[in-house]
Image (spheres, rainbow, N blue to C red):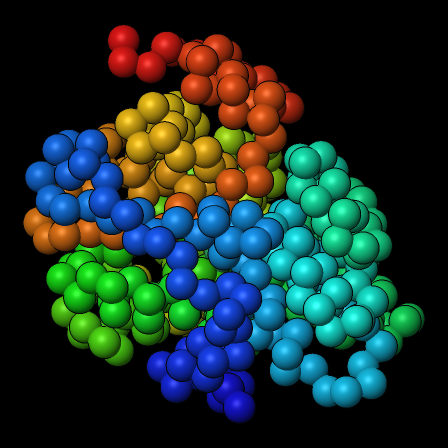
Amino acid sequence: MPDAATVTLSDIMSAARVIRGVADATPLVPSPFMESRSGQPFWLKLENMQPIGAFKLRGALNAVASLPEGCAGVTCCSTGNHGRGVAYAARERGLRAVICMSELVPQTKVDGIRALGAEVCIVGRSQDDALAESRRLVAEEGLTEISPFDDPFVIAGQGTIGLEIMAARPEVGTLLLPLSGGGLAAGIARAARAIRPDIRIVGISMDRGAAMAESLKAGRPVPVEEVASLADSLGGGIGVDNRLTLAMCRELLDEVVTVTEEEIYGAMQVLYHEDRIVAEGACVVGLAAVLAGKVTLDRPAATVITGRNVDMKMFTDVISGRDVVLGDLTVKGTPYGR
Ligand SMILES: *Cc1c(COP(=O)(O)O)cnc(C)c1O
């Protein structure tokens, strides 16, 4: 049973047993291109290969498995992938699931959740609006809320990625972790630091609405304006009542770096053209930080390719070098390699 205040290596090892056979053991593959650019062996943990196309299945399975018999069902707010994980895990247990999302969530993610049999509520323009609706369902319909990141079972589930990376490549000395609410980074960092205390851990967010980066600076949860981004899965705040991830990120992350939309655009092109991987903007922030010279590597490194549930129109525009228009944002196109 996780401690209320943090998540331990032993919680993560328990999560690994819970999710075994459903969401474990994705490949860890080398990126020769990133090695040539960074001067260090560079590994990609392919969480885009999970059954729901994203790592969020790990945390969702672990959290849903922890619920008592006879519970009325589950609800959550989500930028898309957590909702899909919860929908998948709830279906496995025969539970009702209601997923609350804002209008900023791409249609492809909404469709994926409906296809798993979950109910979908689209409310407002931010994660906070979606969270308020989810809380209303808890109060009025007796559903259990599963936070996308600030839940000990969710964090422990995501942490299993850290166990797998360190088991497969013990020489990894730097982890580059996409950072939004911080469940992924906190879980992986807890596992990796326990196994290799001197490991360097860098969290990376997009500079448009970097809620965890701002909150770490301020020493308390800072609300940020939510805006469209190529890295839509990294949107949203960390919650004004954040219990776990802010403290864990403060304890475990050595650095937090932010990248621009142009840097994300370029790194999506690299991942596709060099490594032939289809992935969301959120996945490439680690590559982007290295390619932009914001992180210099002195040891073998690994990053997590967190998900593949990208809007295909946006994706094909990026890899073809066309402009991308997202709400009030236009990212200017550049053909790859010029
Ligand atoms: C949720 C998500 C992240 C960020 O995870 P946090 O735990 O919120 O920091 C990164 N990439 C993808 C694809 C995601 O779905």
Q: How many marks?
A: 0
* Residue under the image location 50 percent in, 86 percent down: 2
Q: In which quarter of the view is residue 165 placed? A: bottom left
Can residue 244 be seen here? The reply is: no
Is 314 left, or right, of 128 in this rendering?
Answer: left
Q: Residue furthest right?
A: 140
Q: Is residue 23 above or below residue 81?
A: below
* Residue under the image location 52 percent in, 25 percent down: 315
Name the foreground residue: 318 vs 138: 318
Q: Is residue 250 above or below residue 263?
A: below
Q: Is residue 15 above or below residue 214?
A: below
Is 220 left, or right, of 259 in this rendering?
Answer: right
Q: Residue furthest front?
A: 21
Across and down, in percent, residue 61 comes to 60, 70
Q: In which quarter of the view is residue 69 placed? A: bottom right
* Residue under the image location 45 percent in, 65 percent down: 24
Is 244 left, or right, of 86 in this rendering?
Answer: left
Name the foreground residue: 59 vs 51: 51
Across and down, in percent, residue 42 comes to 20, 45
* Residue under the image location 26 percent in, 56 percent down: 175
Name the foreground residue: 262 vs 307: 307
